[in-house]
Image: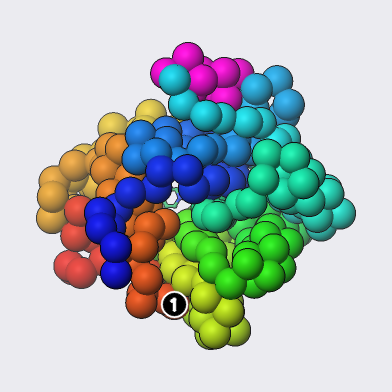
Amino acid sequence: MTFPLFDLEGRRALVTGSNQGIGYALARGLARHGARIVINGRNPEKVETAAQQLRTEGFDVSAAPFDVTDAKAVADGVAAIEGGEGAIDILINNAGMQFRTPLEDFPIDKWDQMLRTNISSIFYVGQAVARFMIARGEGKIVNIASVQSELARPGIAPYTATKGAVRNLTRGMSTDWARHGLQVNALAPGYFRTPLNQALVDDPKFSAWLETRTPAGRWGDVDELIGAAVFLSSKASSFVTGHMLVVDGGITTSL
Ligand code: NDP
């Protein structure tokens, strides 16, 4: 074992869905621990703007816009990074979507889109990146799950289904790829004020409920996810695989 354990100097991290929200915070957090970053999202201009913003802070950042629900675009995008910038040492499978409505009214096209965005993407990007990592005999994959991997809430049953699947796909990936030197873990955030949660952020009744329901008594700050992400991306977690690390102020462990 070599020290320090949490150093990401020179490691390249692809963070999907990182032009805003949790993905951007994690990209910036990994960069602050020495990683080179590849920013992703669907809109090339938004991706370049986020990448440029991080470059102004002195970080080594490139932009790779592609749609994580398009398997061909994913394969081409990952091959372009590996052949251009270089090896992807860390993959943060973060891109995701939310849509809230009672299950009896849930539109079928939204169900399909949610499955593609929240779970198929993890298989597409995970497989494409893992093939390169397996050839090198090492790699770190962190799949962004949710407290909804464990608990249901009204109006988001399909989201809950996808996030439960993220947890189990993480277990499957870790089981298949551990012998190749890869560690695959999930990071499960509680509630954070991002565009995905805008409707909840704008609803004072929800905040009141959340602050009572959460033992820590508040929303999370996206920067509070960085420590867990760095741990799961670094050699500090070299014998941790198939695990889901929950960062939620205590929601999932309390009634
Ligand atoms: P945001 O909506 O703020 O950001 C989502 C990101 O994903 C954007 O950068 C978006 O970029 C990108 N994205 C969406 N669809 C695609 C796609 N098909 N291809 C490529 N990129 C895509 O969400 P959050 O930051 O809140 O969420 C990030 C992750 O964290 C998600 O997986 C979410 O489920 C999870 N999570 C969030 C929690 C929270 O409290 N916010 C709690 C628990 C889990 P663009 O639209 O420009 O393509």
Q: Which residue lies furthest to the front in this view?
A: 2
Residue labelled with disc 1: 242
Q: Residue furthest right?
A: 72
Image coords of residue 253 (percent x, y): 20, 69
**Does 3 appear above or below 192?**
below
**Does 176 appear above or below 183?**
below
Q: Amino acid under label 1?
A: Gly
Q: In which quarter of the image is residue 250?
A: bottom left
Quarter of the figure with the C terminus:
bottom left
Which secondary structure dominates the residues rendered in magenta?
Answer: helix
Image coords of residue 44 (percent x, y): 73, 26
Residue at coordinates 55% horizontally, 55% vertically from top-left?
A: 89
Image coords of residue 128 (percent x, y): 73, 62
Residue at coordinates 52% horizontally, 54% vertically from top-left?
A: 90
Whether residue 42 appears in this view of the structure is: no
Quarter of the figure with the N terminus:
bottom left
Quadrant in which ligand 1 is drawn: top right
**Does 85 appear above or below 252?**
above
Image coords of residue 60 (percent x, y): 52, 29
- Horizontal placement of 135 versus 141: left or right? right
Q: Please tell me which residue lies in front, 121 or 240.
A: 240
Q: How many labels does the image show?
A: 1
Residue at coordinates 57% horizontally, 18% vertically from top-left?
A: 52
What span is colored magenta in the figure? 49-57
Q: Quadrant of residue 29?
A: top left
Q: Please tell me which residue lies in front, 46 or 76.
A: 76
Q: Quadrant of residue 197?
A: top left
Whether residue 207 appears in this view of the structure is: yes
- Horizontal placement of 65 versus 228: left or right? right
Q: Is mark 1 within 8 Å of ligand 1?
A: no
- Horizontal placement of 224 versus 124: left or right? left
Residue at coordinates 44% horizontally, 20% vertically from top-left?
A: 58
